[in-house]
Image: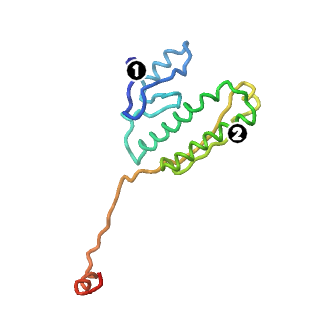
Amino acid sequence: MHSNLMQPDRYLPALIIDTVKLEQQDVQVERLNAPRLNYLGAGDRINPKEQPALDGVRERGRTADMIDMSIQAAHKWACDQVVNKGYFDAVVSSVNAYLRQLKARGAILGGKCWVDPDFNTEADIAAGKVTFSYDFTAPYPAERVTFRSTITSDYVASIFSTAA
């Protein structure tokens, strides 16, 4: 096992996909040794050992990482396909179905995928570069639960009542 390959926690696989060209190996080593790692090409993932667990950031970050990785892994088929309206519709429909499934499970509060024309110019599409945008809201964890109590004499009368 590579010394720079670390298991962030028991929920995420310890796989790193090289996204750096061979001539940039020194940059890759710096990235792998940094506290932020790139898992399955999902972008920078914050290393939980370096991240403070404040305001549910870790839990929502974990949800975001899993969604990112799942969408990318499930859409490997989208590479080397003919880019046309049907292609965009198929990918958007697939991602939206996945986000609806996550919402039904209670894993997210909602989300949607769309194609933003600003990120899919004619030049980009001609070069084979397509971009899909999506958003979602992960549920917030209850980090501070408070119970309020009141001492009252309102229930004294119930001692003598016949109704239960």
- Sequence-earlier tag: 2 or 1: 1
Residue type of the residue flagged with mark 1: Asn
Q: Nearer the viewer, residue 134 or 37?
A: 134
Q: Which of the 4 image quadrants contains residue 127?
A: top right
Q: Kindly identify which numbered label has been placed on residue 96.
A: none
Left or right of 133 in this view: 60: left
Mark linked to residue 4: 1
Residue 9 screen position, x and y as percent: 37, 33
Determine crowd level at label 1: few under 14, some 14-19, many 20+ residues with C-alpha closer than 10 A: few
Q: Quadrant of the C terminus?
A: bottom left
Q: Is 16 located above or below residue 117 in the figure?
A: above
Work out whether residue 34 or residue 99 is closer to the camera in this orientation and state it.
99
State the CA–CA distance, disc 2 to disc 1.
39 Å
Q: Residue at x 46, y 28 (%)?
A: 37
Residue at x 62% of width, y 39% of height: 94
SS for callout 2: helix
- Which of the 4 quarters of the picture holds residue 14? top left
Label 2 environment density (alpha carbons within 10 Å; few <14, some 14–19, many ≥20): few
Left or right relative to 131: residue 123 = right
Q: Which label number is shown at residue 89?
A: 2
Label 2 is placed on what type of residue? Asp
Quadrant of the frame with the N terminus: top left
Residue 116, x across and y down, in percent: 69, 40
Residue at 63% across, 43% down: 113
- Secondary structure under tag 1 reads loop
